[in-house]
């Protein structure tokens, strides 16, 4: 197995607070990282790096763990440009919203869906995302949901069954019948292809009792819960996520003090998705309030064609710093270690011996530049599982 040292790193984000500046980022100056096979085997000061087969000179730039995008919806067809354009232009728009995507997804072939998925994954990887979670939720039939999960599972281990995204159009008059389908035949077909189960717990989607029934049924089939919670209104989603020990409550835009306390006293991560607020001109989630209360916060893209069509974690970091009260360091931590927590993983989201060699080289001397230089393609090179995947020369 060949080994590679990346040396001459001006700032190395390890996310190990026992290292470097002892901050949560564990920032080591003048650092080096040694990769062997798919793992990190050594980190430390550049001058002390052991001999290796290969050497990469980072040229005084920053190295970070690859981004962990713990919330996306990438198995779909079609787009909703007109809907976005109308919303941003202040024009009324009455077409089908998510139902438009459901119809296009059902009509697409497997090859079309997978080509679309691969395109977004490549796009995300180029921007530094080395782990992504993705969900079903645009099929809403047993066959279409299980197909989406099968396709997603070819590309990631972090696959989430979201049959309870909205009530399928065929069940508009019979939501109880749709919940019975999701917790019965659809779950049977989907459980073998997924790790997680998710529910959109929101007015107009699924209420607290329905969400509890769906998540509990999923848990009985070996799936672990995560919840779309408190995005558009106050509601029971966050409390339910904590009650069921969900790995993550996602969105968390409208929270009572009791919701914040519940999160702070649990291991459920609050995953914030600023791309959604950006794309819908909605109120920002208050990351500062959550962090000050001691809640673990993750940052993700929510990449989907309706409400957040960005695959860029750096963009979300910039928004979180500008509009959600996060410091640049907190935003970087949340997009790496926070995402790993939201997926209950400790082999990603940090650069330490034993972790996967998922890392990115920024074309900047400091990770602060991710917020300081918004919209600039700063990711210069990416390693995933120890392999260089971004071909630009260092
Ligand atoms: Zn979502």
Image: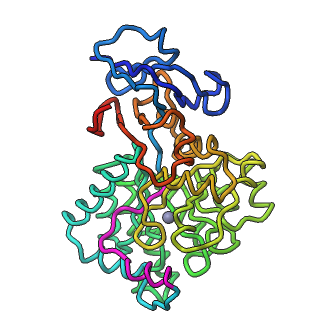
Residue 349 position, x and y percent, is 50, 37
Q: Is residue 2 above or below residue 233?
A: above
Q: Quadrant of residue 271?
A: bottom right
Residue 264 position, x and y percent, is 74, 49
Q: Quadrant of residue 258?
A: bottom right
Residue 142 position, x and y percent, is 34, 71
In the image, is residue 76 part of the stretch drawn in magenta?
A: yes
Query: In this view of the protein, can residue 203 be seen by the observer?
Result: yes
Is 7 positioned to the left or the right of 78 in the image?
right
Q: Nearer the viewer, residue 174 or 318?
A: 318
Q: Nearer the viewer, residue 182 or 232?
A: 232
Q: Nearer the viewer, residue 258 or 287?
A: 287
Magenta region, residue range? 71-89
- Residue at 41% across / 63% down in the picture? 73
- Residue at 67% across / 25% down in the picture? 22
Q: Quadrant of residue 24?
A: top right
Which quadrant: the C terminus? top left
Which quadrant: the N terminus? top left
Q: Is residue 359 above or below residue 71?
A: above
In the image, is residue 152 part of the stretch drawn in magenta?
A: no
Q: Nearer the viewer, residue 139 or 45?
A: 45
């Amino acid at each position: 197995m060949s080994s590679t040292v990346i040396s001459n790193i001006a700032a190395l984000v390890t996310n190990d607070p026992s290292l470097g500046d002892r901050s949560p980022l564990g920032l080591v100056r003048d650092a080096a990282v040694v990769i062997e096979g798919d793992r990190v085997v050594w980190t430390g000061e550049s001058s002390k790096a052991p001999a290796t087969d290969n050497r990469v000179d980072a040229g005084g730039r920053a190295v970070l763990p690859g981004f962990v995008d713990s919330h996306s919806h990438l198995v779909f067809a079609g787009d909703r440009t007109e809907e976005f354009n109308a919303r941003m232009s202040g024009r009324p728009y009455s077409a089908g919203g998510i139902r438009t995507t459901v119809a296009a997804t059902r009509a697409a072939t497997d090859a079309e869906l997978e080509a679309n998925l691969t395109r977004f994954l490549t796009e995300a990887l180029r921007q530094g995302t080395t782990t992504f979670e993705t969900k079903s939720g645009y099929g809403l039939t047993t066959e279409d949901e299980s197909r989406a999960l099968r396709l997603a599972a070819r590309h990631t281990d972090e696959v989430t069954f979201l049959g309870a995204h909205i009530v399928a159009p065929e069940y508009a008059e019979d939501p109880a019948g749709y919940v019975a389908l999701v917790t019965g035949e659809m779950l049977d077909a989907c459980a073998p292809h997924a790790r997680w189960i998710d529910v959109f717990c929101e007015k107009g989607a699924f209420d607290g009792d329905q969400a509890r029934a769906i998540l509990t049924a999923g848990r009985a089939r070996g799936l672990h819960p995560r919840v779309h919670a408190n995005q558009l209104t106050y509601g029971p989603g966050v409390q339910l996520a904590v009650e069921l020990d969900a790995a993550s409550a996602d969105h968390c835009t409208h929270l009572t003090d009791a919701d914040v306390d519940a999160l702070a006293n649990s291991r459920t991560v609050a995953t914030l998705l600023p791309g959604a607020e950006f794309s819908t001109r909605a109120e920002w989630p208050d990351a500062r309030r959550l962090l000050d209360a001691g809640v673990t916060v993750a940052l993700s893209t929510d990449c989907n064609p309706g409400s957040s069509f960005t695959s860029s974690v750096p963009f979300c970091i910039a928004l979180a710093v500008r509009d959600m009260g996060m410091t640049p360091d907190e935003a970087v931590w949340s997009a790496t270690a926070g995402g790993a927590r939201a997926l209950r993983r400790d082999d990603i989201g940090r650069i330490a011996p034993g972790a996967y060699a998922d890392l990115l080289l920024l074309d900047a001397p400091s990770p602060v530049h991710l917020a300081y230089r918004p919209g600039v393609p700063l990711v210069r090179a990416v390693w995933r599982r120890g392999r260089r995947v971004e071909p630009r020369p260092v």
